[in-house]
């Protein structure tokens, strides 16, 4: 199963700061079931135990920063300990899945109904474990089926991604047709989105000062980190069901979004 995931999104596609790949456990163990999620928390590991899954496939790495000790003094250490104690392997496909063709950004674009999607910004290329070359990129840009007024575009995002609020700059006074996407913390792609001729840029996070200076140039729409990447587990499911038929796959029922909108 790990080979199937890495053929789709080779580890060399990940960013230099990342820690994608095997986090805990053994790769040769027979898979009793795979629990698919965005984040690995103690609650998610408990869900894997309860559902008889000995594999967790996550988007965000369980071990992102090096662990100097494993004593249970924080949530990451406790999740690692629980996974090891229960013989659960954890595999994370992070920025390599962001950057892969058909990966996270393509899934976001698909949920918006974007057509003719191509990479924009920095392009990448990696060799998969079967020797094939896999193309990648930091962002995806495509076109809506029909141009939309800015307020209707925002309403569509709220509906499609179950978002309680969208952080946006001044609403465009022209129709939106070409849309650039970078899930998660994608504010670094704003300049590239403008160069790509996008009418709107959709991402999960941006800082306050990054909104300045772009009124009527591009519609910024920030929908939340979790919300932008929440459908990543559907990508995992599709890969596993295609490449490893017969393996039980479950989408987590645990909401790991730590942010509340009150």
Image: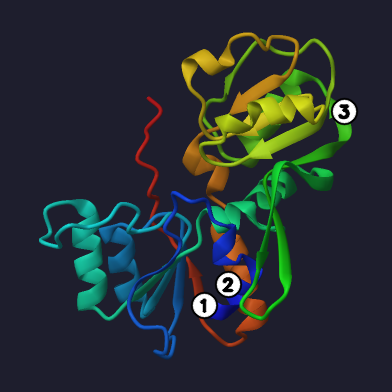
* Discs 2, 1 touching: Cβ within 8 Å: yes
Q: Is residue 70 above or below residue 240?
A: above
Label 2 and label 1: CA atoms lie apart by 5 Å
**Which residue is more in the foreground, 20 or 83?**
20
For marks 3 and 2 on the same chain, the one whose residue lies earlier in the sequence: 2
| Residue matched to label 1 | 2
Q: Residue at x 51, y 30 (%)?
A: 164
Q: Is residue 181 left or right of residue 62?
A: right
Q: Is residue 188 left or right of residue 181?
A: left
3 vs 2, front mark: 2
Circle 3 sits on which residue? 147
Q: Secondary structure at mark 1?
A: helix
Residue drawn where x is 62% and y is 62% of the image: 235
Image location (x, y in percent) of residue 244: 60, 84
Q: Nearer the viewer, residue 106 or 123?
A: 123
Q: CA distance from mark 3 to mark 1?
A: 40 Å
- The answer to whether 65 is drawn above or below residue 223 in the figure is below
| Mark pair 3, 2: CA separation | 35 Å
Q: Secondary structure at mark 2?
A: helix
User: Which residue is the site of mark 2?
Assistant: 5
Q: What colour scheme governs how the chains and residues are painted in the rendered image of this protein?
A: rainbow
Quadrant of residue 145 within the rendered picture: top right
Q: Quadrant of residue 187?
A: top right
* Mark 3 Cα shell of 10 Å, populated few (<14), some (14-19), many (≥20): some
Residue at left 15%, top 62%?
70
Quarter holding the C terminus? Answer: top left
């Amino acid at each position: 199963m790990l080979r199937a995931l890495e053929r789709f999104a080779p580890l060399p596609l990940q960013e230099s700061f990342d820690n994608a790949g095997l986090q805990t456990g053994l790769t040769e163990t027979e898979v009793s079931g795979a629990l698919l999620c965005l984040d690995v928390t103690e609650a998610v590991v408990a869900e894997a135990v309860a559902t008889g899954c000995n594999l967790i496939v996550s988007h965000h790495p369980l071990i992102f920063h090096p662990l100097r000790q494993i004593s249970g003094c924080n949530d990451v250490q406790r999740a690692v300990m629980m996974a090891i104690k229960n013989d659960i392997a954890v595999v994370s496909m992070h920025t390599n899945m962001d950057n892969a063709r058909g990966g996270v950004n393509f899934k976001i674009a698909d949920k918006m109904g974007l057509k003719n999607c191509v990479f924009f910004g920095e392009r990448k290329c990696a060799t998969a474990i079967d020797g094939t070359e896999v193309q990648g990129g930091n962002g995806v840009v495509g076109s809506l089926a029909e141009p939309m007024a800015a307020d209707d575009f925002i309403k569509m995002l709220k509906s499609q991604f179950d978002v309680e609020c969208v952080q946006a700059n001044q609403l465009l006074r022209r129709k939106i047709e070409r849309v650039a996407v970078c899930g998660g913390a994608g504010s670094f792609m704003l300049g590239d989105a403008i160069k790509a001729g996008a009418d709107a840029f959709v991402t999960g996070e941006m800082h306050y000062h990054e909104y300045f200076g772009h009124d009527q140039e591009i519609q910024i729409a920030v929908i939340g980190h979790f919300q932008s990447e929440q459908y990543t587990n559907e990508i995992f499911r599709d890969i596993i069901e295609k490449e490893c038929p017969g393996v039980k796959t479950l989408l987590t029922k645990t909401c790991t979004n730590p942010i509340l909108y009150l």
